[in-house]
Amino acid sequence: MNQGRLVGIILMIIGMGIAAMAGLFLAVRSGQPEATMGGTVLGAGLAFIVVAPLIGFGFFLYIKGGQDAQQESVMQKQRQLLDIVKSRGEVGVNDLALEMGVKVDMVRDMVHQLVGLQVFSGYVNWKDGRLFSADAKQLRDLQKCKNCGGDIQLVGKGTVQCPYCGTEYFLN
């Protein structure tokens, strides 16, 4: 469990503890003959002023911690994908998805995210399901597709594609 979630849980527990103690105190105090309804309402209001921010901020930290943990998990998967492809040079997309425990579509999304972050250079043939790591310097001078020999075309920032076989080259 990450630190944000833990702090959020602790704040919510403290807030509920204070609310319980204030509720017991007010219940006991309202049963005494000298207690007034105004004093009880004032006590409840003051307890609410203390308890509501604790529980609210604790809930916020709990939710934010969950989002941070999810984002960290995605980043770890991206690092894992990058390490596998760079260390092997060539890997099957289906094998990569199986090894990482994700769907092929998620592998495709992660490859495009890594290209957008400019940390991956290489090429992929989605039809054949092969992902290749390559030096960006070699790919910048490329005129013909390594897969089929066809002319390649610029399709996006740092991305060229073969219109014949669909192989994408990432030039980061």
Image: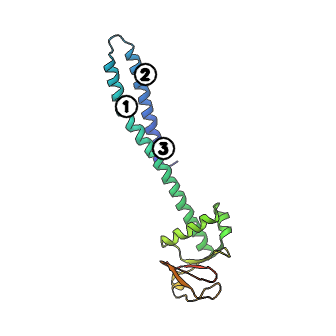
Of circles 1 and 3, the one toward us is 1
What kind of colouring is applied to the model shown? rainbow
Q: Which mark is residue 14?
A: none
Left or right of 124 in this view: 28 = left
Residue 93 visible to an observer of this rendering: yes
Instruction: Give the crowd class for mark 1: few <14, some 14-19, many >=20 residues within 10 Å.
Output: some
Nearest the eye: 34 or 132:
34
Q: Which residue is mark 1?
A: 48
Residue farthest along the top direction in this orientation:
33
Type of amino acid at the residue the image marks with label 1: Phe
Instruction: Give the label on residue 24, or none.
Output: 2
Separation of residues labelled 2 and 3 (CA atoms):
27 Å
| Residue 113 locus on image (x, y percent) | 52, 68
Q: Residues within 10 Å of mark 2 (few under 14, many from 20)?
A: few
Q: Secondary structure at mark 1?
A: helix
Give the labeled residue for mark 3.
6
